[in-house]
Amino acid sequence: MKLPQVALYDQVTLRPLNLLGALHEPDMTIQVVPGYEANAEIGRISAEAPLGRAVLRRSCGDTITIQVQDHSVSMRILAVQKTQDALEAVPLEAAA
């Protein structure tokens, strides 16, 4: 069975895999949105941002790596919550 891929408006839970990140950073949940809806403070990440581009079309269990300043950060996709469109998307602050 093929796992669903991350698409716009999906909520994605990520776990840092780097040694320091895994010790000091909790799992995080983001929602991938079009750039004009992005608001990083509440976890709405633009599909055009490095993190958004890295998770799009990936599946639960995949590992992604993004470049942050002068080092790379690896994360594993733990969960993908699918939504049909923007109308069904639940604001992250309401889901917490």
Image (cartoon, rainbow, N blue to C red):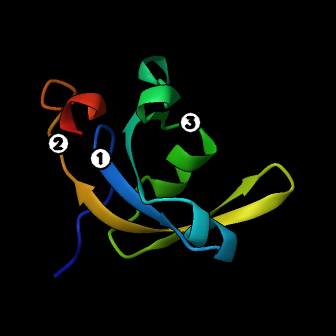
Whether residue 59 is situated above or below residue 33 in the rendered picture: below
Residue at x-position 54% and y-position 55%: 54
In terms of sequence position, does the residue under pointer 1 or pointer 2 come before the other?
1
**Direction front: furthest residue:** 24
Estimate how packed mark 2 is, as few (under 14), some (14 to 19) or many (20 or more) residues with alpha carbons within 10 Å. some
Estimate how packed mark 3 is, as few (under 14), some (14 to 19) or many (20 or more) residues with alpha carbons within 10 Å. some
Q: Residue flagged by tag 1: what amino acid is it?
A: Gln
Quadrant of the snapshot with the N terminus: bottom left
Quadrant of the snapshot with the C terminus: top left
Whether residue 3 is situated above or below residue 55 in the rendered picture: below
In terms of sequence position, does the residue under pointer 2 or pointer 3 come before the other?
3
Residue at the disc numbered 1 = 11
Q: Quadrant of residue 33?
A: top left
**Direction top: furthest residue:** 36
Q: Residue flagged by tag 3: what amino acid is it?
A: Glu
Whole-percent x and y of residue 37?
Answer: 41, 20
Q: Label 1, secondary structure: give it.
A: strand
- Residue contact at pointers 1 and 2, CB within 8 angstroms: yes
Q: Quadrant of residue 20?
A: bottom right
Numbered label attached to residue 83: 2
Front one among 40 and 32: 40
Whole-percent x and y of residue 72?
Answer: 74, 63
Residue at the disc numbered 3 = 48
Residue at x-position 14% and y-position 39%: 84
In terms of sequence position, does the residue under pointer 3 or pointer 1 come before the other?
1
**In 3D space, how far apart are the residues under numbered discs 2 and 3 (Cα atoms)?**
19 Å
85 relative position to 38: left or right: left
